[in-house]
Amino acid sequence: MPEKQKFVPSPMEMENLTTPERKQIVKRNYDEISRASLPEYFDPPVEQPQRAEIAYYRCQTDQVPVY
């Protein structure tokens, strides 16, 4: 039985990241924040039922008669 070799990951490339910019924290009043709007619900229109032959029409060209 061959001996398993130890997994050695490939060395990672070093990358120097730029230092993040300092930003000023802005405090807001509770009244300045907009409220979440509620979704509007509507009743979909009632559609007429269809027969399966109409709804799932299949082209007849693939049915070749056998003589």
Image (spheres, rainbow, N blue to C red):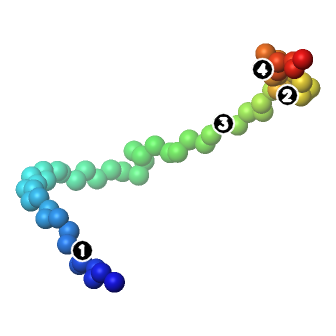
Quadrant for the N terminus, please.
bottom left
From this view, report whether residue 2 is shown above or below residue 18.
below
| Distance from Cα at disc 1 to Cα at disc 2 | 64 Å
At mark 4, the secondary structure is helix
| Label 3: element kind | loop
Q: Choose between 27 and 6: the one closer to the eye.
A: 6
Q: Residue 21's mark?
A: none
Residue 55 % position (x, y): 84, 25
Q: Nearer the viewer, mark 4 or mark 3?
A: 4
Distance from disc 4 to disc 2, alpha carbons, whole Å, reads 35 Å
Marks 3, 2: nearer the viewer: 2
Q: Is residue 32 left or right of residue 8?
A: right
Dot 4 or dot 3: first in sequence order is 3
Identity, as a three-letter code, of the amino acid under mark 4: Asp
What residue is shown with label 4? Answer: 62
Residue 28 visible: yes
In the image, 7 versus 36, the foreground residue is 7
In this picture, residue 40 sits left or right of residue 65: left
Give the CA separation, mark 1 to mark 3.
57 Å
Lower sequence index among marks 4 and 2: 2
Q: Which residue is mark 2?
A: 46
Q: Amino acid at mark 1?
A: Phe
Is mark 1 in CB contact (under 8 Å) with mark 3? no
Secondary structure beneath dot 1 equals loop
